[in-house]
Amino acid sequence: MGICVLDKETIKEPRSSRLALRLGHDSLHALAYNPDDTASAIYRRLPLESSSASLMKSLEEVVYDNPVLLSDFLQIDILIDTPRFAIVPDDIIAGDSDMTQSLLIKAIGEEAASGEVILDDMTHIGATIVMSVDSDITAFMRRTFNNPTIRHNLSPQCRYFFDKNRIDNAGKMYVNLRRDAMDIIVLGNDSLRMANTFRFRDIMDAVYYIMACREMLDLDPAGNELLIAGDEALRDEITPILRKFLGYVMPVVPPAYVPKDDEQWEKAPFDLIILPLCE
């Protein structure tokens, strides 16, 4: 048995709250919040066994060790952090259900696309994330939770930054840093130009990916802004390096409801904590 970090004393009124989960390779992150009072939100990180062979078993144990997760929430959203995805313009796949599988296989390979294919429709952006998730994981999620919405972890970021970027149509790059990976999203002219995840071990690898993406998209070093979210220590390390090459490098301001100087919240994934603002 594992350790219970979420109970009815932690989440006292689940029926009036929404539950957002984020499944990564080594953690299940949980965010419970009342949509009318986000300041009362509760966040916890639940560690998982990271090997693929034990992930499913570990996920089941963590959920059942924290039975409040099984409560009757208003709404349940589940973010999946997986490299097995492709982003496709909506007009390409409109009305053709077979096209999504074909595009996914072409993008990530037939073996990687062998799980359940899920469409994450980012309607107002005009694009859809097509992803493959292990069928045993999606089956567990659907039989355990009440009608969950399953999305890719890039989805809330694309929607959140797109809405912010519409105020200014100039091209902007957004980076979300975490311990061993980062998401890069580029928006411009009221459209999504790029969204992808890059794994890295050294901070200079992250710098390389950022600069290579900017060069590929012909972003102006002086004029096109770079805004960085995510892990604060990594952000502090990478920012002075990037400022040697770019004219505008600034942090993304976290949502106002997130408590400051709170140990629990310091490692909360950015894509999870912005979910209440993407409704």
Image (tube, helix red, strand yellow):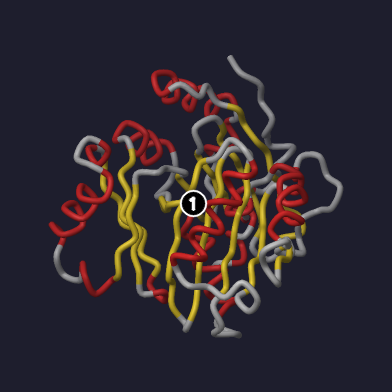
Where's residue 255, x and y in %? 72, 63
Q: Nearer the viewer, residue 14 or 203?
A: 203
Asked if residue 166 is positioned above or below residue 39 in the image, the reply reads below
Q: Residue sitting at 48 percent across and 56 percent down?
A: 154
Apparent side of residue 222 relative to residue 260 in the rendered image (left or right): left
What residue lies at 67% left-to-right and 51% top-to-bottom?
230
Identify the image quadrant of the N terminus.
Answer: top right
Q: Nearer the viewer, residue 234 or 83?
A: 234
- Residue 150 pos. (x, y %): 41, 50
Above/below status of 258 relative to 186? above
Q: Nearer the viewer, residue 43 or 170?
A: 170
Q: Which residue shows up at 42% across the image and 42% down it? A: 82
The residue that label 1 is drawn on is: 153
Q: How many marks?
A: 1
Residue in view at x 50 percent, y 58 percent: 212
Q: Quadrant of the C terminus?
A: bottom right
**Which amino acid, by three-letter code, is at mark 1?**
Asn
Tag 1, which secondary structure?
Answer: loop
Which residue ends up furthest to the right in the rendered image?
261
